[in-house]
Amino acid sequence: MATAALFLTLFVVATLAGCAQEGALVTATPADGSALAAGPRSVDLTFDRRPDLAQSHVGVRDSDSVALDRGELTAAGPRTVRQPIETAGAGTVVVAYHIVFDDGTQTTGSVRFSVGTGTAPAGAADGSGHEHGVDPLGASLLVVDLAVLIGVVVMLRLRPRRHSDDGPPQQ
């Protein structure tokens, strides 16, 4: 029973540690919510870990949903990706990203900035970005399921064994 309790404890600790290890955006250039006089030639996104360029993508669109990204996503440093862009006029620019990291974790989100308007874009820097996380109820139910499974296995291992007879009774 002590082995089952140790296994359950290790599983819960590993699960909770894995939940806390999702990658995150550290900085964006241009910054989220910034108002620029002229359009940048690229967007740089820096993360807290090394991105896997082959599995990551960044899309850049203007307020009319016209794609502004040009060329391939490239590395601009060990933890920074660069997406070349071309802005055509004044308006809001939305940078949406889905980054997969070398360790297999991932993050998604968006950054908004304006070009030539003199004001910050609506909806920028409000903290309501698209995020994925672990559902606390689902995680709790998985832990309960594991505890029940361990209990069943322990009970099956500790049950008394039936002794079989050597054959049918003699007359």
Image: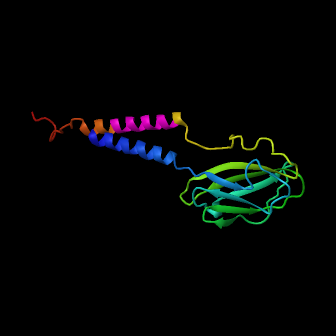
Residue 152 in the figure: left or right of residue 42: left
Q: Nearer the viewer, residue 54 or 84?
A: 84
Answer whether residue 24 is magenta in the image.
no
Was residue 146 drawn as part of the magenta stretch in this picture? yes
Q: Quadrant of the C terminus?
A: top left
Q: Nearer the viewer, residue 106 or 114?
A: 114
For residue 58, side relative to residue 23 (left or right): right
x and y percent of residue 72 in the render?
A: 74, 66
Most distant residue in the right direction: 89
Rendered location of residue 107, percent (x, y): 62, 51
Range of the magenta residues?
A: 138-151
Position above or below: 143 against 104: above
Residue extending furthest left? 171
> Looking at the image, which residue is at 13% across and 35% down?
169
Q: Which quarter of the rendering shows the N terminus?
A: top left
Quadrant of the image occupied by residue 163: top left
Q: Position of residue 136 (x, y in %)?
A: 52, 35
Report the front residue among 3 and 73. Answer: 73
Q: Could you say where residue 64 lies in the image, as x and y percent from the top left? A: 87, 49
Q: Give the residue drawn at x 60%, y 51%.
A: 24
